[in-house]
Amino acid sequence: MTFHLTQEAGAVPGFLRARKRSQASRILNDLGMIDSALDQYAIENNKKTSDPVATADWPSYVKKGSPLYNTGNSLFGTGYGPQTVDQIPQVPSNDYNVLSDVAGTGFWSPYGP
């Protein structure tokens, strides 16, 4: 019995690390979708470099029904906020801080701090 408890206790940190890494991957994927959505929005609306894009405008260019489409927020509830044409969206600083132990600066490229 002791062996199993010891094994399970060791598995918990690994599970938590894997979960956080999965969350980081999802946010990284969201940032890529936002980047593509901004490009599409700019093309369809004749926007130029440095034009602002309101938060209400870009979610309609991501997959309908997805959490990103429905909320415009990260899975932690942090808003990605307004964006700018031809500027790469950035990982929200609060999300970066929560996940920095499993996803350092290199992980977030090109969307990192």
Image (tube, rainbow, N blue to C red):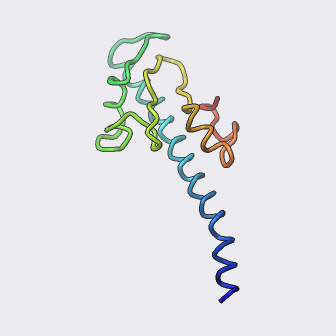
Q: Residue at x 66, y 45 (%)?
A: 103
For the point 54% across and 40% down, the residue is 28
Give the quarter of the figure containing the N terminus: bottom right
- 25 or 39: which is nearer to us? 25
Which quarter of the rendered picture does the C terminus lie within? top right
Q: Measuring from the top left, give residue 45's x and y in whole percent.
A: 33, 15
> Taking 101 as reference, is 111 left or right?
left
- Against 101, residue 97 (above or below) is above
Question: Most extreme residue toward the bottom, as rendered?
Answer: 1
Q: Viewer-proximal residue, 40 or 96?
A: 96
The residue depicted at 47 percent of the width and 17 percent of the height is 84
Q: Position of residue 50 (x, y in %)?
A: 49, 10
**From what the image shows, is residue 20 above or below residue 112?**
below
Which percent across, then down, holds residue 110? 62, 31
Q: Position of residue 55 (x, y in %)?
A: 37, 24
Horizontal relation, residue 89 to residue 58: left or right: right
Asked which quadrant contains residue 88, the reply is: top right
Q: Reply above or below: 92 against 39.
A: below
Foreground of the two, 110 or 93: 93
How many numbered markers are drawn? 0
Q: Residue at x 62, y 38 (%)?
A: 97
